[in-house]
Amino acid sequence: MIPINPLEHQNAMKTLYSKCVAWVCQKHRINRMELDILLFLANNPCYDTATDIVEVRCLSKSQVSASISTLEEHGFLKKMYTDGNRKTAHLILCDAASEIVTDGHKAQERFAAIMLEGLSKEELDCMKRCMEHMQNNIHRFLKEEGK
């Protein structure tokens, strides 16, 4: 028996997050995947390739690729190649994306405030450690299964 089943709450959290970020997508005329990619790059500067986004977020390669192309066409991000390596494109946020990222951060802060209201610092620290541990378990398992 699983003592806590995170899947029971997954849809409610996804629904809340979608409601919190919907205005950002509408205001800037982008879709949710495009917003998620911009925020991922802004929030995780050490992960800056399409492969990073696919692996860390467990997203579909084709959806990420299509969204990156759209974001690049609209001038929200650009690709940079280093050391003559034309195989690995590093994704750089452009100034045109700054307002979207700012609004996205506001939406993420609202989401966190609603979801975490009433939790103590100790509870939040414990939850963070547990979530990181579970995430590491999941990624380790998925990596091993991929072999």
Image (cartoon, rainbow, N blue to C red):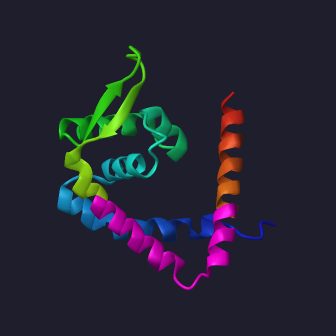
Range of the magenta residues? 102-129
Q: Which of 92/107 is in front?
A: 92
Residue 19, placed above or below residue 39: below
Magenta-colored segment: predominant secondary structure: helix
Please state if 13 lies on the left or on the right of 20 as rendered: right
Please state if 125 lies on the left or on the right of 93 as rendered: right
Which image quadrant for residue 69?
top left
Residue 133 place in picture, x, y as percent: 70, 55
Residue 102 place in picture, x, y as percent: 29, 60
Quadrant occupied by the C terminus: top right
Query: Residue at the spot x=65%, y=70% of the render?
Result: 125
Residue 33 place in picture, x, y as percent: 35, 49
Q: Which of 95/142 is in front?
A: 95
Q: Which of 139/110 is in front?
A: 110
Residue 32 place in picture, x, y as percent: 33, 54
User: Magenta includes 49?
Assistant: no
Residue 72, placed above or below residue 98: above
Residue 14, placed above or below residue 84: below
